[in-house]
Amino acid sequence: MTDARPVGAVTLGLISDTHLPLRLPALPATLPELFADVQLILHAGDVGELRVLDELGALGPVIAVHGNDDTPEAQRELPERALIHAGGHRVLLWHSHHAHRADELEFRKDDSWKPKLDRLAAHARSAGADVVVFGHTHIPLVTLHQGVWLINPGALAAGNSFTVQTVRSVARALLAPGRPPQVVHLDITAPGRALDVTPDGEAGFLAGARPYWRSIFPPELRSVAAGLLDAMQAHQPVLEPGFLRAAQRVWNGSQPHLTWEDVHREWASDPFVPAALLAEIGPRP
């Protein structure tokens, strides 16, 4: 960031995918330092409980949208998109998910980046925006694509129950009339260290994700995830609470990976998991 602020410049704090408190117990203590002196905070969805916005509001004005994996309250009270004029730029704030899960799953079958970037740029142009601030991928990004600046601040929490966010980041963006955005991505665990988020368009989406999130299971046990997923889908209301209790220990950093034994132990101690179901699942799928 330059020290000499252009006339009409606005400094934004960008954040996304907090998923609080399901996958993140609290906003990081470093956030006030990272967002010091920002004039506006944009949250790009998957907020979690709406109290996240109250806490961010103590640092500056906040505009937020909801994501596909948000709480019912956030989906009810927050818009899907917001259009903002700041620093001489029109900014589209959008989580970037598909409205229908079937469409989302179909879109994910293509691992290449280009269709994803094309879609973001097309939605920006339809709104007359030259900047998109988005979330959803849990991958920090800044790139100029088809005349539109695409900015993802990264994520603070895991994207789903079976992953861990290994790099948790936010971003600061300086927007000024007639100038391209100046964006710095910041690791919340090392506030003074800027992240290099230069995209590799040839690597593919999953390869691009590798530095930022991973499976919650150790490599030798990742095949176990399929059995776990099958069991939880068949008996989700009963089994999910125990799984989430076990997963929290990885998400909060108290253990590096999740094992089947960790999950089974939680289920065995849960009075709402019937003994017959526990026996059916067994000690290892």
Image (cartoon, grey):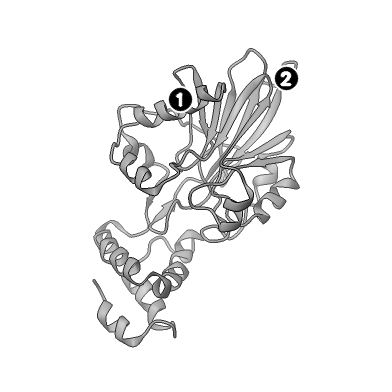
Residue 168: x and y in percent read 51, 46
Q: Amino acid at mark 2?
A: Arg
Identified at 41% across, 59% down, the residue is 161
Task: Using the image as rendered, state which of residue 204 and residue 105 is in the foreground.
Answer: 105
Task: Write down the quadrant of residue 243 in the picture.
Answer: bottom left
Between the residue at mark 1 and the residue at mark 2, the CA separation in whole angstroms equals 31 Å
The residue lying at 31 percent from left, 81 percent from top is 277
Camera sees residue 282? no
Position of 123 compared to 279: left or right? right
Q: Is 103 on the left-hand or right-hand side of 174?
A: left
Rendered position, 66 above or below 241: above
**Disc 1 designates what residue?**
122
Q: Report whether 276 appears left or right of 182.
A: left
- Which residue is identified by label 2? 5
Q: Nearer the viewer, mark 1 or mark 2?
A: 1
Residue 184 location (% of width, % of height) = 57, 30
Given residues 165 and 21, the one toward you in this image is: 21
Q: Nearer the viewer, residue 71 or 254?
A: 71
Checking the image for residue 64, the label placed there is none
| Residue 275 at x, y percent in the picture | 33, 87
Element class at badge 2: loop
Residue sitting farthest toward the top: 178
Residue 35 visible, this orientation: yes
Labels 1 and 2 touching (C-beta < 8 A): no
Which sits earlier in the primary sequence, circle 1 or circle 2? 2
Residue 8 vertical position relative to residue 208 in the rendered view, above or below: above
Q: In the rendered image of this protein, does residue 76 appear above or below residue 249?
A: above
